Amino acid sequence: MIRGKPKTALEALTRRRFLLGSWPWRALAHLLGTPVVAGAAALALFPPALPWAVALANATGPAPVPWETVLLLVLVGGVLLGAALPVVAAPVARVERWRLRLVDTRPLGGGSRRLGLPRRYTDAAAWREAGYTVLLASAGALMSTALCGLLFILGVITVSPLLVLSGEPIVIGVDTLTAPEQAVGYAVGAALVLVAAPYPVALLAAAHAAVGRALLGGEPLRAELVEVSRSRARLVDLFEAERRRIERDLHDGAQERLVGLTLRLGLARVDLPPDSPAHDDVVAAHDQAKQLMTELRELVRGIHPRVLTDRGLAAALGELADRSAIPVAVEADLPERLPAPVEATAYFVVSEALANAAKHSGATGVSVTARVRGGALVVEVADDGVGGADPAAGTGLTGLADRVAVLDGRLLLSSPAGGPTAVRAELPCAR
Amino acid sequence: MRAVTRVVLAEDGVLLRAGLAGLLERFGFEVVAAVGDAGALVEAVAAHRPDLVLTDIRMPPGFRDEGLRAAVELRRADPDLAVVALSQYVERSYAAELLDSGDGQRVGYLLKDRVVDVEEFAGVLRQVVAGGTVVDPQVVRQLLSRRRDPLARLSAREREVLALVAEGRSNAAIAAHLAVTETAVGKHVGNILAKLDLPPDQDSNRRVLAVLAYLRAEG
């Protein structure tokens, strides 16, 4: 199996070269930050939780208070905490999402919303953030602090032979170290454990990340979809740029030279006496070259029309209309050039719609309109034909609908039996 | 008028430029300068004072319509200068701009592909130098086809004749082309002018201008 670079601490854990890479350090950085954030969250939540602390102290204290008072304190504390949690959770979640990238580089999705205060209390995502904050301030704080402490102790033992030299005895659990010779054994053991420490550290970070992803991320499917549609849009942009490049190469290279060649054949044809043995061949060659010129021009036009690149959509629509078999009235209100993918998609929608109108509709006239409304290009092709166009019947519109969808646009078709047919594409212009 | 027509040629494709220069020489034109961009075109015209400018519309540095801009500019400075512009695709605004420069005479707008029919192309150049106006048949055809009225009133044959008229052909040439008598062509032309509410006129050049003026007004 070919595997790319790991995207999460958990993935990195399964690699053989885990200890040599950057992931142990990333996990450690995440771990060291956790008590800080968790402490800050706990600190912020402490005042609203004060009634609970009072209740706890009184309930277990030497002079028990009436249970009504305890209940009241618990209730007041609950309300206060409930009010404070979503507010405290928002900045905590923001910091935690940012920190999450240390141990999980996959896009998280969601979380970019900034809700007004009242809406936080009704928003499910805000309450998931609140839940995360509670977990962080309790279990998260506990586990990360414990692991940090353990690492610190291991670190101290590792350097204990040096510390002992300065004269201070060091107490470690069951033993007290006073001499370097005595400390070396412990130091070697601690060092060995430290070398393996990245594994539990990364494991905790991975668990933390999993909880974070579940509670702080947008709906996972949605995040994936956003990523997929972005990647699809990038691909289409790439294709579009590639088409323009191919068109340019053909146009400036092959097409230009073919005209030059055909021109020379034309000159040769004129100069050869009609009874010369080469005359017929040259005439045939000239005619074939002309045929080839026409075919190449059509091919290039189908890839990406030059007039669209040079003069923009309005001019290209005019040219389309001119080439149409049925009379076409174009009304294009486009004061400025639009993004290239939008222009190209609009052009091919109109091209296909006009071809369909000419082939199937029996229309005597078609109107094409193009204008920008509310940040979207709206092109409409309407004929006065018999209608009944079926998008499922392979009219080429389905493929165009896909192209339109990639740009986050919509392709609408209205074609009742009896007509008329209208095709409308709406393409957002701001990318 | 000088015996030999002196031409400044502007085309950025080296191969095609050489081919066009060969064509011009072959048909008795004198190429006084062959350049590759619009700036050099303007300079060459100032230096050589040619009778005819043959230019590609799309040229460096911007590869948009530099050649056309230069041609219109040159025509403004010298309305008698004959200009033929070659275009890669039909663009009505190009044709209209050229025809609007000067008095609309001594201009030609052709698709680039036309140059390969060398004799016809040389004929077009001579026509333009002689004071004619030539618009590419495809341009004319498209302009005619997209208009519903009053050109819809024309019969198919009359449209055909009108297209040929717009190409700058005489009645005799049209008659030969359509294999009909010249009288028949004269009748068609009379009908066309009547249907388009244009006064009858025997001057072929003014016929073209009348047609083009009409097309332009609607375009």
Image (cartoon, coloured by chain):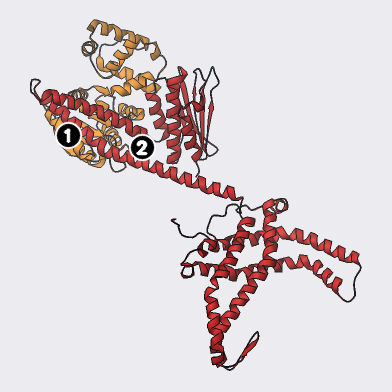
Tell me what residue is drawn at x 62 percent, y 68 percent: A34
Q: Quadrant of the N terminus of chain B?
A: top left
Q: Give the answer, above or below, for where A52 lies relative to A247.
A: below
The percent position of residue A232, horizontal first and vertical second, equals 47, 44
Q: Residue at x 38, y 22 (%)?
A: B217
Residue A404 is situated, as x and y percent measured from the top left of the image, at 49, 36
Report the disc number at residue A310: 2
The amino acid marked with disc number 2 is Asp
In what quadrant of the picture does the C terminus of chain B appear? top left
Q: Residues within 10 Å of mark 2 (few under 14, many from 20)?
A: some
Q: Nearer the viewer, residue A407 or A2?
A: A2
Q: Chain B, which colour?
A: orange
Nearer to the camera, A223 or A189: A189
In the rendered view, does A333 fall on the left or right side of A304?
right
Q: In the visual, does B194 lie left or right of A258?
A: right
Horizontal and vertical percent position of residue A229: 51, 45
> What's the CA distance linking mark 2 and mark 1?
25 Å
Residue A154's disc is none
- Label 1 packing within 10 angstroms: few (<14), some (14-19), many (20+): many
The chain in red: A
Give the residue pinned by disc 1.
B19
**Element at label 2:** helix
Closer to the camera, A253 or A1?
A1
Chain letter for mark 1, please: B
Give the SS element for disc 1.
helix
Q: Residue at x 58, y 66 (%)?
A: A203
Q: Position of residue B140 (x, y in %)?
A: 32, 21
Comparing A171 with B4, the one in front is A171
Q: Amino acid at mark 1?
A: Gly
